């Protein structure tokens, strides 16, 4: 039983470390509408950190 508890603890720690080391590069999402382009820059959590509207 102690072995299983230790294994569970190690796996939980590994999962936390994996999430913490996730890719933190900003991502750009482009959406188009009638006559305009909206570019959103998001962080690794999906939060919008910047936007730019291009009217054309």
Image: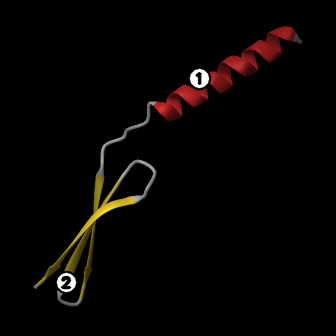
Q: Residue at x 67, y 17 (%)?
A: 10
Q: Secondary structure at mark 1?
A: helix
Q: Position of residue 46 (x, y in %)?
A: 43, 56
- Name the quarter where the N terminus is drawn: top right
The residue at 53%/26% (across/down) is 17
Question: Could you say where residue 23 lies in the image, as x and y percent from the top left?
Answer: 38, 38
Q: Quadrant of the C terminus?
A: bottom left
Q: Position of residue 48 (x, y in %)?
A: 37, 61
List the single residue furthest toward the right.
1
Q: CA distance from mark 1 to mark 2?
A: 44 Å
**Which residue is located at x 81 percent, y 17 percent?**
5
Tally of numbered tags: 2
**Residue 36, quarter of picture:** bottom left
Q: Which residue is mark 1?
A: 14
Residue 4 vertical placement versus 18 (above, below): above
The part of the image, by quadrant, that contains residue 32 is bottom left
Return the disc, 1 or 2, that comes first in the chain's sequence. Answer: 1
Q: Is residue 5 above or below residue 41?
A: above
**Above or below for 36 versus 15:** below
> In the current view of this chain or complex, which residue is farthest to the bottom?
34
Q: Quadrant of residue 22?
A: top left
Mark 2 burial class by Cα count in 10 Å: few <14, some 14-19, many 20+: few
Query: Residue at label 2?
Result: 36
19 displayed left or right of 47: right
Please identify the residue farthest to the left as the structure is shown: 56
Looking at this rendering, what residue extends furthest in the top direction? 3
Question: From the viewer's perspective, is 13 left or right of 18?
Answer: right
The answer to whether the residue labelled 1 contacts the one labelled 2, judged by CB atoms less than 8 Å apart, is no
**Which residue sits at x=59%, y=23%?**
14
């Amino acid at each position: 039983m102690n072995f299983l508890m230790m294994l569970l603890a190690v796996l939980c720690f590994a999962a936390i470390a994996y999430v913490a080391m996730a890719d933190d590069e900003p991502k750009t999402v482009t959406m188009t509408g009638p006559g305009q382009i909206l570019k959103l820059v998001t962080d690794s959590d999906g939060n919008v950190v910047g936007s730019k509207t291009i009217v054309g």
